[in-house]
Image: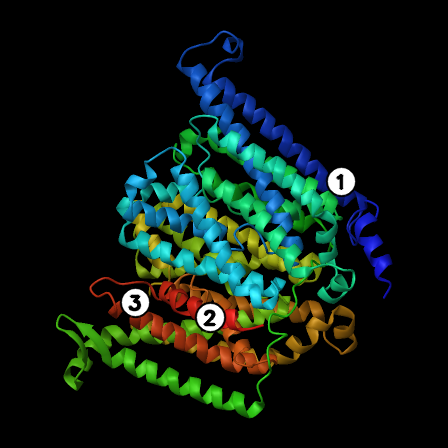
Amino acid sequence: MNFTRSLRQLTSSPLRTLPGTTSWQTALVALALAAMVLAASALSVANAQAILPAAQWPRAHDLQAVILRDSWLPRLVVSLLSGALLGLAGTIFQQVLRNPLAEPMTLGVSAGAQLALTIATLVAPALLGASAAAPQWLALGGATLAAAVVFGLAWRSALAPATVAVAGLVVTLYCGSIGVALQLFYAPYLRALFIWGGGSLVQQDWSNVTMLAPRLVVGGALAWLLLRPMTLFGLDDENARSLGLSLRAVRLAALALAVVLSAAVAGAVGVIGFVGLAAPALARLAGARRLAQRLVAAPLCGALLLWLTDQTVQRFSGLMGDLLPTGAATALFGAPLMLILLARLHRTTHLPAPADSGATLHAASARALRWRGAALAVLTVAALALALDFGRGPHGWYFATWTQFSHVAVWRAPRTFAALAAGALLAPAGVLMQRLTGNPLASPEVLGVSGGAALGLIALVVLHGDAGHGARFAASSAGALVALVAILGFARRSRFAPDRVLLAGIAIGALFQSVLAVAIAGGNERAASLLQWLAGSTYSVTPADAMLALAACLLLGALTPLCARWLHILPLGDAPARALGVNTARARAALLMLIAALTAAATLLVGPLSFVGLTAPHFARLLGARTPTQQLAIATPLGALTMIAADWLGRAALMPRELPAGLVATLIAAPYLMWLLARRR
């Protein structure tokens, strides 16, 4: 390969639309962005006039003038600066990690910041009130510490993109799980964090502007200085190293820059999701193909997206309430825009997928895998028996006698078998998702089906209060079905290309996150109830639910191994797959429907955020499973074992209090996965 020619193509290719797009499609995206600019400008003028008529601006000195000058104007500027910073950080993350799913939340930045503030609120509230800048410095410290843990976990692998991405997501899950557990226990004391976690842009002075503006200028300058080495990340590691690039040093410098930019936004205004993911995607759709173009276009798209969202929230604040966080509402505008653009455009460039996260790990022999699979099966049966018979009562831990067992089994058995079924459903769904997309960050939660199921439940709870169990089941099923139909519809024109499916699923998932943040922003009883279910509680499972779950597990589990041939062939590409007699569109559609069925069935039991579907495939790979059949055989009992242990610990360890099974599963799996990642080269 001519490396000089490759470098020249990467750094100096002329501006053109993405392959597979036409000029009118790029013009469509540009027209949509122009319409967003006009809408944001009109809303800004209307909002400013509502505070103080324009005719009075030059000579006004009353309260309205103070509000306009010291609250509204800083909020406008902060929305532009925050959106630009997140767009720039998202572009750097996606380029360095070679992953279209990477964003400022990838390295645990937002989760670390929120956990630091949560702990400070409970342990040292006086520290938060020491100065106006104290919350910002605490959030910045938590974000930096989380990123440092990620770098430490991935250091032995030379900060390889897949390892950094997986380590970042694990740290995010772990910090987020601890935060949710604290919120469940101390919800009345953490109401302000519900608002902060949604990304509130309310300002009282110009201090955040003076903090964010220099960071954007300096960060943009540093990103431009790193343009040439970051461009080389468009090549694989071997070619980049042959061109003289110090992979570890440049990755560390670029990722550290993106972390600092993201942490600055988190410390100033809280967690604002989706912008860091959507802004680079919108820049690509608009025709910004080269990295230099994206470093300019993505911050502009991010600023525009957050500006429009914030002005719309302000315009309708009388209808939605004054405490509606702008960050939570961002996806309400950005996600539909992404979905519309995805539906109108034909397939674009296949977004670069990361290298196989297990490529450097040793493959276990068939005999060793059989022994490990048998050991996992024995452990699963033992855990099932232990969860049914061993528990905690008023006088401590005990094994139930036969008489006692007949009484407690009525309560324990449905929950335990439902947890087993949920784990055995989510784990193969995760394997199928990661194999289909070639992306180690892909999971059933990313597909958007679980988010659709949760949206159905949230709509039911918000509109009708605490409805019955049957109504909850129906609402969740309807939401999952709508999400699946939407994803298949948006991805159909691209022949169900994995990158398009992921972007559509993420957009729908972002909608779910925004609606959830709005729903729990009040911090009332409904918020606590939603958090309990969303964290994966099996408390309300009935015997009938458990029987249906086991039946779905057996039926769908029997279908899963039949897809092994597709999972071997589809990663080869469309042309080789068709040459081998595989209809790629139908095969991908069938796999997506199977993933959706597995995910929806599990979501109805334990909520959408257990993340067993993300961690179980990685555990299976770390145990030596390489082929799809091996990974399915190891991941399925791993998922079942994890959920059984999590449900048992959640209901027994802190009795009379309970922790949801999905939350405990993350708390159990994340540290072990961190340990395994830290040991591997």
For label 3, the crowd category at 10 Å Cα-Cα, with few meaning under 14, some 14 to 19 and many 20 or more, is: many
According to the picture, the residue beneath numbered tag 3 turns out to be 650
Q: Nearer the viewer, residue 609 or 165?
A: 165
Report if the CB atoms under discs 2 and 1 are less than 8 Å apart: no
Q: Position of residue 533 (x, y in %)?
A: 35, 58
Q: Is residue 523 left or right of residue 94?
A: left
Q: Earlier in the sequence, mark 1 or mark 3?
A: 1
Residue at coordinates 56% horizontally, 81% vertically from top-left?
A: 625
Q: Earlier in the sequence, mark 2 or mark 1?
A: 1
Q: Is residue 90 left or right of residue 11?
A: left
Residue at coordinates 71% horizontally, 50% vertically from top-left?
A: 345
According to the picture, the residue beneath numbered tag 1 turns out to be 27
Cα–Cα gap, marks 1 and 3: 53 Å
According to the picture, the residue beneath numbered tag 2 turns out to be 675
For label 2, the crowd category at 10 Å Cα-Cα, with few meaning under 14, some 14 to 19 and many 20 or more, is: few
Q: Nearer the viewer, residue 133 or 586?
A: 133
Q: Amino acid at mark 2?
A: Trp
Q: Secondary structure at mark 1?
A: helix
Q: Amino acid at mark 1?
A: Ala
Toward which corner of the image does residue 469 lie, by quadrant?
A: bottom left
Q: Is residue 637 above or below residue 269?
A: below
Q: Secondary structure at mark 3?
A: helix
Q: Position of residue 86 (x, y in %)?
A: 57, 43
